[in-house]
Image: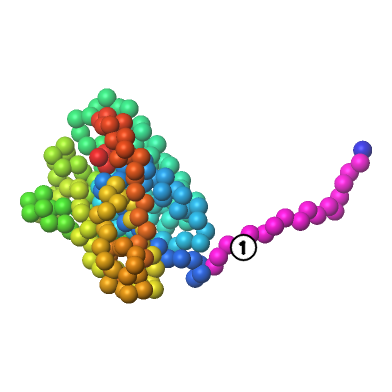
Amino acid sequence: MHIQTGTEIDQPVIARPAVEERQRVDIVLASDAHGAFVWGVLDRLLDEPGLSFRTITASGFGAMEAAVLAYGLALGGRRGARTALTNFWRRVSHASMSAAVTANPLRSILEQSIDIAEIHKRSCPVRLCILASNARTDEVKIFTSDQLSIDAILAAATVPFLFPAVEIDGDTYWGDGDVSALPLVQPFDTGHRLIVTGKPALFMAPCADRRLAAIPCAMTCTPIHAIFDSQHRAASALFARPWTDWGE
């Protein structure tokens, strides 16, 4: 028998960018983007070694996905985030097949999918901002830092009038937070903002920065990249079935 030993095979080595060399990205998940579509976008972004997540702002069902992503990144980096999102959607699928639809299933799914304490830690690599609407005044509130809680995330994902609003600090909140109410972002060279939305024209406005004057953007002073869920809008009837996705 011939035994081959000491053989070396040259393989290309792909150098991954250092953390400080990665492009910092702020992600905005609008409430009108289909939840499964958002999952696909996040999974694709996790496959980009040159990107670094800085802030995730979300409303609607995307708030739950953003929380799961942040939790997964905090525990196990990109692989941990992918695993966390996969497990989360597995729970959503199991709940959607249940015949019991008289109660909001989101709380138990969320409590099984994240530990809010991990997101509160300074070691968490992303800053999470959750938008929910005051059910009494219709004013949009941004929950972040110590204000983040299971209740805040659940409120953002709660479909108005389909489920009762969630009480937080003596007031009630539910979903449909308008991401156009976001404050202005930091100066031009601090990073990019990626918006996942179902309304491509929602954020289009003249940019105050002359370097971007020819480019339609919103949130002034930062490059805007919008991913439009066109397939969802073109075939919205396909997603009209109840319990397929609680982001609608």
Kindly identify the residue that appears in the image at 49 percent across and 70 percent down: 20
Would you name the residue on which mark 1 appears? 15
Task: Give the residue at the far right of this rendering.
Answer: 1
Does residue 184 belong to the magenta stretch?
A: no
Does residue 13 belong to the magenta stretch?
A: yes
Q: Is residue 55 visible?
A: no
Q: Decide which of 11, 172 is in the foreground and name it.
A: 11
Kindly identify the residue that appears in the image at 23 percent across and 29 percent down: 101
Q: Main secondary structure of the magenta part?
A: loop
x and y, in percent, of residue 193 in the image: 35, 62
Task: Give the residue at the far left of this rendering.
Answer: 136
**Label 1 Cα crowd, 10 Å radius (few <14 / some 14-19 / many 20+):** few
Give the magenta-colored segment's residue range: 2-18
Residue 119 is left or right of residue 46, and the answer is: left
Quarter of image, res 235: top left
Rendered view: 216 above or below 135: below
Quarter of image, res 236: top left
x and y, in percent, of residue 141 in the image: 18, 58
x and y, in percent, of residue 95 in the image: 32, 32
Rendered view: 150 above or below 187: above
Kindly identify the residue that appears in the image at 42 percent across and 57 percent down: 74
Q: Decide which of 210, 77 is in the foreground and name it.
A: 210
Kindly identify the residue that appears in the image at 30 percent across and 27 percent down: 98
Give the amino acid type for the residue marked by disc 1 in the picture: Ala
The quadrant the N terminus occupies is top right
